[in-house]
Image: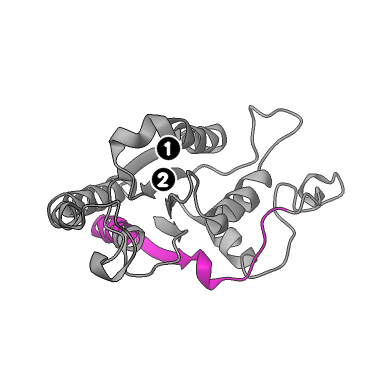
């Protein structure tokens, strides 16, 4: 069993990265081979709409033909049994790098002859979303619709999708050093010390579950 984690966060060692590491630890506990990919370490573009993956004469139909540092990642993702994608939410969206990855990853499999029959191989999929936003603000910011959209795309292509949310996260260790006055730094710290470890436990359990035969 091969489990690949796609990290769309620019911050190593912080919330998104910590959760993904727990996912992979959980997967490893189930005997899986694991890999972490940091998108911000790569130089790549999103889909350029060249349509080459749809050409009738293309011998690699349903495979992205762009050549850059994402190319080998897409090859390994194609072969993986499980993919866990993770991103912080910035301005009510995933990061730009994650969005570009999703474009390249999914569009190659889109079947314009019959969208109900994508060209994607069978695999298990999960999303991990982190955000400093509390759940009480989800409706006003459209977060429910956002998560449903990203889950829906994965279900369209792979028929399944698990989702883990980590909310109201701590952004920095020392709030006194930043202009972040709208947040209660003590409350953020308490939540990071009490709730975030529970999120990490859920991430471990998610990885263990998804890596089981």
Residue 174 visible to an observer of this rendering: no
Q: Quadrant of residue 7?
A: bottom left
Mark 1, Cα crowd under 10 Å, few <14 / some 14-19 / many 20+, is many
Nearer to us of marks 1 and 2 is 2
Residue 151 as seen in the image, left or right of residue 165:
right
Q: Which residue is mark 1?
A: 161
Instruction: Give the mark, 1 or 2, whose residue is nearer the N terminus.
Output: 2
Residue 156 as seen in the image, left or right of residue 210:
right
Image coordinates of residue 47 in percent, x first then y, are 70, 53
Q: Which mark is residue 127?
A: 2
**42 in magenta:** yes
Q: Which residues are magenta?
A: 19-47
Residue 80 visible to an observer of this rendering: yes
Q: Quadrant of residue 160?
A: top left
| 95 vs 202, nearest the viewer | 95
Assign the N terminus to one quadrant of the image. bottom left
| 186 vs 80, nearest the viewer | 186
């Amino acid at each position: 069993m091969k489990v690949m984690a796609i990290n769309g966060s620019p911050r190593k060692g912080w919330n998104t990265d910590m959760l993904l590491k727990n996912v992979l630890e959980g997967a490893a506990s189930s005997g899986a081979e694991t890999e972490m990919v940091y998108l911000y370490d790569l130089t790549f573009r999103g889909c350029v709409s060249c349509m080459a993956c749809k050409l009738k004469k293309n011998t690699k139909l349903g495979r992205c033909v762009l050549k850059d540092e994402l190319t080998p990642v897409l090859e390994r993702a194609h072969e993986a049994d499980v993919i866990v994608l993770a991103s912080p939410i910035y301005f009510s969206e995933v990061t730009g790098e994650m969005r570009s990855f999703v474009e390249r990853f999914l569009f190659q499999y889109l079947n314009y002859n019959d969208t109900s029959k994508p060209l994607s191989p069978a695999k298990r999929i999960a999303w991990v979303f982190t955000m400093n936003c509390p759940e009480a603000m989800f409706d006003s910011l459209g977060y429910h619709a956002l998560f449903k959209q990203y889950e829906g795309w994965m279900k369209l292509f792979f028929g399944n999708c698990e989702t883990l949310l980590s909310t109201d996260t701590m952004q920095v260790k020392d709030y006194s050093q930043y202009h972040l006055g709208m947040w209660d730094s003590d409350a953020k710290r308490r939540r990071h010390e009490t709730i975030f470890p529970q999120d990490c436990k859920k991430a471990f359990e998610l990885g263990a579950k998804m890596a089981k035969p």
